[in-house]
Amino acid sequence: MTNHSFEDDRRNFLLTIAGSIAALAAGSLPARAQPAGDPPLSLSTIGAGREGGALGALFIKAGHRVMFSSRHPDTLKGLVDELGPLARAGTVAEAVEFGNVVMVVVPYTAMEQIGKDYGNVLAKKVLVIDVSNPIARRDGEEIVKRVDELGGAGLATAKLLPGVHIVRAFNAINYAKLSADAHRQGELVGVPIAGDDPHAVDIASSLIREIGFDPVLIGGLAMGKYLVPGTPLGGEHTAGEIRQIVTNLH
Ligand SMILES: NC(=O)c1ccc[n+]([C@@H]2O[C@H](COP(=O)([O-])OP(=O)(O)OC[C@H]3O[C@@H](n4cnc5c(N)ncnc54)[C@H](OP(=O)(O)O)[C@@H]3O)[C@@H](O)[C@H]2O)c1
């Protein structure tokens, strides 16, 4: 049963990636929003599973170079081959070195070790996007309790990755929806974000616009506790809806 649903997820993931590739083949690359003259950003993902893979594919579609990482990078060969020359695979250490911007898209249980192993290097990055969530049924009740005691996912990540310019984003948009939601017709899908560093927030906002979403800063990392599945901000909302939901959170 579990295997079956994992296989379904895997198939959906590959379909999501295939959709991105089809758009690439159709020549539908949107122009990069980065101001002319700025050096292009390199992005990395720590975690290239369902969400990390789908997000990385969107950044490739937007014209960025992306290194996807795994503790077993050989397993990513199919993914990077399909995504083309802007995609590459590496170890976690290689990805941490490679990206100007690093996305952390792992089960939250991995965050502490990532902080110990790579915290010093991550602290030198202009932006680390924290997409990870503590989820009781996957990560255990204990870690969820610990994160709550630290003030929720935003402040907990800041504690585990000290000195890192963190912005939480994309935490509660399902990987299978990302490709279709990007550059949606009509009003864009909003992405609520939380971060304490204004420069990191600016870069995150610009990147989010480039891949076809509308960023909405809901506050500092203390607000990151609302950026997890199961809160009123979870799922897809327009920017206006997000602002309305946030007024009711206070
Ligand atoms: N799935 C979604 O729709 C979704 C949406 C929003 C947010 N998220 C959040 O995103 C995170 C990842 O979810 P997912 O669904 O993408 O999970 P997933 O498909 O199981 O992928 C998890 C990834 O994390 C990596 N990883 C695990 N432990 C690691 C460690 N100690 N060091 C480095 N990498 C490690 C794995 O790489 P290896 O190859 O090395 O095992 C794998 O690539 C979770 O926190 C989840 O809550 C998921």
Image: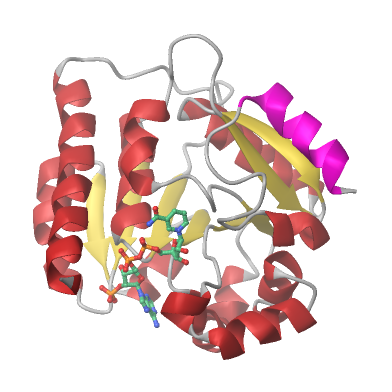
The extreme top residue here reads 186
Task: Provide residue 239's location: percent of width, then percent of height.
Answer: 67, 26
Task: Provide residue 173's location: percent of width, then percent of height.
Answer: 48, 44
Task: Provide residue 64's location: percent of width, then percent of height.
Answer: 38, 38
Q: Main secondary structure of the magenta part?
A: helix
Is residue 110 visible in the rendered structure shown here?
no
The extreme front residue here reads 1
Q: Identify the image's colour scheme: rainbow, by chain, secondary structure or one colour.
A: secondary structure
Figure check: 192 above or below 146: above
Is 76 in the magenta? no
Q: Residue, x 57% and y 82% (percent of image)?
A: 115
Give the image quadrant in which the ligand numbered 1 is located. Answer: bottom left
Figure check: 60 above or below 153: above
Nearest the viewer among 162 and 225 is 225
Q: In which quarter of the image is the N terminus?
A: bottom left
**Quadrant in which residue 88 is drawn:** bottom left
Q: Residue, x 15% and y 36% (percent of image)?
A: 18
Is 244 in the magenta? yes
Q: Residue, x 45% and y 57% (percent of image)?
A: 99
**Quadrant in which residue 134 is drawn:** bottom right
On screen, residue 151 versus residue 169, left or right, reads right
Task: Provide residue 35's location: percent of width, then percent of height.
Answer: 59, 23
- Residue range of the region highlighted in magenta in the rendering: 238-249
Is residue 40 visible in the rendered structure shown here?
yes
On screen, residue 178 versus residue 28, left or right, reads right
Nearest the viewer among 241 and 47 is 241
Nearest the viewer among 136 and 62 is 136
The image shows a total of numbered marks equal to 0
Nearest the viewer among 235 and 115 is 235
Figure check: 220 above or below 149: above
